[in-house]
Amino acid sequence: MEKMKIGVIGAGSISDVHLQSYANHPDVEVYAISDLNEERAKAKAAQYGASKTFADYRELLALPEVDAVSVCTWNNTHAAIAAAALDAGKHVLVEKPLSKTVEEALLVEEAAKRSGKVLQVGFVRRYASNTNLLKRFIDDGELGDIYYAKASCLRRLGNPGGWFSDVERSGGGPLIDLGVHIIDICWYLMGRPKVVSVSGNAYNRLGNRSNIQGLSFYKAADYDAAKNTVEDLANALIRFENGASLMVDVSFTLHAKKDELSVKLYGDRGGAELEPELQLVLERHDTILNATPQVDDVTFNFKDAFQREINHFIAAARGEAETLSPVQDGVELMKMLTAIYESARTGREIRL
Ligand SMILES: NC(=O)c1ccc[n+]([C@@H]2O[C@H](COP(=O)([O-])OP(=O)(O)OC[C@H]3O[C@@H](n4cnc5c(N)ncnc54)[C@H](O)[C@@H]3O)[C@@H](O)[C@H]2O)c1
């Protein structure tokens, strides 16, 4: 079988896990890389063996031999690039969030329908092996009806700077960057119930704390602490049509004792924690059991999850599997996120 030729658009920090995962795939050739900063694209091309580089992504999309692309650019460019790639006949893996606005997300959905190509949203946690294992228990009814979920992703110091903290290019701070992951994973495991309302708060009280020394954190390729127009803490309550609810809080900076990542689900037969460590809470013979699966990855394994996401994308592009994170789910997440920002802005509950 001829190897599938891959293009990667956006050659910054996260592109490395895409490029490495494609490079590890036996049926794939890392073929072309585009970045506004062409030197960056060239350096990655040398590292991963790509033969072509472009400053303008449209030149990459014009190559008929490119079968599929990853979009790893700033949030405000995801939708336009993803739609152009679909219209050029490429399968697309677009990093989260799908877009900056709901309107843009709907344009990508239309382009995906029009093209018949695969559009996979980079909800990498859906592909992680700890999620996969928990999903098997949930699908088997071990938790019963999940009526409550609670998730936190709190960084005490972790504003990635650069475009991430420029609301024009990112669409927001920790809510659109980190909240998108934990809201999505709860919603996915709850069975994607229809959202009826959201209520949220967003604060910009601490700024990016760029004065703090001695602690390292994830940074944009063009790290710059000078501009910071995004929230540093957000929280939300999301209500679903089936009566279930989800509570989340996320931060880039917070006076917290330590970083915190937790994802908890509560059903009428059992409960589960996906993070910080996969654990099931079951009831058998009038006894509560905290059950820890004996597997390698009880926590989220970053590299392995990306590899599984890329492998699944390639399988979907070949027609061998359905993507686990289709465009419609990217649209629904954009509806939730933008409604939370609207609620925070107006001080009201938003009905969807
Ligand atoms: N799934 C995850 O866990 C995860 C983790 C980190 C980042 N991300 C997402 O990946 C995306 C990129 O994040 P990052 O951390 O790599 O940022 P980054 O700033 O390190 O890299 C972004 C790159 O995109 C380039 N770029 C911007 N617009 C472009 C355009 N029109 N054409 C070509 N190149 C362009 C920039 O020059 C830069 O090199 C974001 O959407 C982010 O939300 C996802």
Image (cartoon, grey):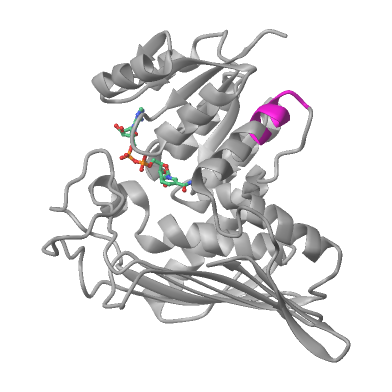
Identify the magenta region. Answer: 312-319
Q: Is residue 277 visible?
A: yes
**Residue beneath the point at 26% across and 25% down:** 37
Where, by quadrant of the figure, is residue 287 drawn?
A: bottom right
On the image, the x and y values in percent for residue 234 come to 39, 72
On the image, the x and y values in percent for residue 258 come to 33, 73
Residue in the foreground of this view, choosing between 210 and 197: 210
Query: Could you tell me which quadrant the N terminus lies in?
Result: top right
Query: Could you tell me which quadrant the C terminus lies in?
Result: bottom right
Is residue 45 found left or right of 263 in the rendered image? left
Q: State ligand 1's quadrant.
A: top left
Q: Is 183 rendered above or below residue 313?
A: below
Q: Is residue 216 magenta?
A: no
On the image, the x and y values in percent for residue 156 come to 29, 69
Residue in the foreground of this view, choosing between 102 and 89: 89
Is residue 182 found left or right of 215 in the rendered image? right
Is residue 25 found left or right of 191 in the rendered image? left
Is residue 334 found left or right of 12 in the rendered image? right
Q: Is 223 rendered above or below residue 193?
A: above
**Residue beneath the point at 41% across and 55% down:** 177
Residue in the foreground of this view, choosing between 119 and 348: 119
**Residue beneath the point at 78% across and 65% down:** 138
Q: Does the magenta stretch mainly form a helix, a strand or a loop?
A: helix
Where, by quadrant of the figure, is residue 255 drawn?
A: bottom left
Q: Is residue 123 visible?
A: no
On the image, the x and y values in percent for residue 169 come to 32, 46
Residue in the foreground of this view, choosing between 92 and 47: 47
